[in-house]
Image: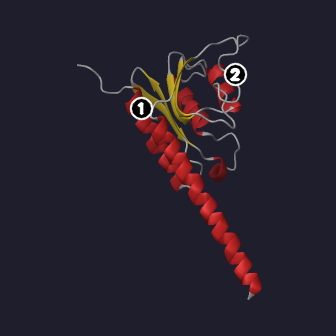
Amino acid sequence: MVSLRNDEYWMRYALTLAQRAQDEGEVPVGAVLVLDNEAIGEGWNRPIGHHDPTAHAEIMALRQGGQVLQNYRLLETTLYVTLEPCIMCAGAMIHSRIGRLVYGASDEKTGAAGSLVDILRHPGMNHQIVIESGILADECSATLSAFFRLRREQHKARRAAVKNAAQE
């Protein structure tokens, strides 16, 4: 029987995790770590709720995967993430020895898989990761854009309310 759990399936799974982040007031990024077509780790952005700047979706998924495997080396795994990883997360991926990274939206501001810098493909790195990008990119980008648009509108409304209160 052919498995229907392909890159698109797992990216949709990561998008559901991104929604959990958004529901918690976090930037909507989700990640799922897969080994042999089974999820062994999942995460969504939680730095605000956890009071932890390292609580990115990717880090959370890698930590859970390490616990499941009882090993920090996550050999032959694939990490699916809705947004191109930052430098911190890229470093964690290299140290954990994941085999493959699949991400949705590029991140021109902090992306470390080619958009801003390319840590993962640097020839000096002692581990090379296969990278696939652009899987459900439009959906991943739309999720982030909608979140930040709403956040800007809320910020604008708060400023207007403060201004109106000061004028009364």
The CA span between labels 2 and 1 is 24 Å
For this orientation, the residue located farthest to the left is 1
Figure check: 114 above or below 11: above
The image quadrant where one finds the C terminus is bottom right
- The residue most toward the bottom is 168
Q: Secondary structure at mark 1?
A: helix
Residue 61 percent coordinates (x, y): 55, 34
Q: In this rendering, which labeled residue sits more in front, label 2 or label 1?
A: 2
x%, y% of residue 19?
48, 49
Pick whichever, 136 or 43, lies toward us.
136
Q: Residue at x 50, y 46 (%)?
A: 142
Can residue 25 be seen in this snapshot?
no
Tell me, what colour scheme is on the image? secondary structure
**Label placed on residue 119:** 2
Identify which amino acid the numbered label 1 is placed on: Trp
State yes or no: discs 2 and 1 in contact (Cβ < 8 Å).
no
Residue 164 located left or right of residue 132: right
Amino acid tagged 2: Ile
Nearest the viewer among 135 and 35 is: 135
Image quarter of residue 83: top right
Q: Earlier in the sequence, mark 2 or mark 1?
A: 1
Provide the residue designation for mark 1. Answer: 10
Q: Position of residue 13 (x, y in %)?
A: 42, 38
The quadrant of the rendering that contains the N terminus is top left
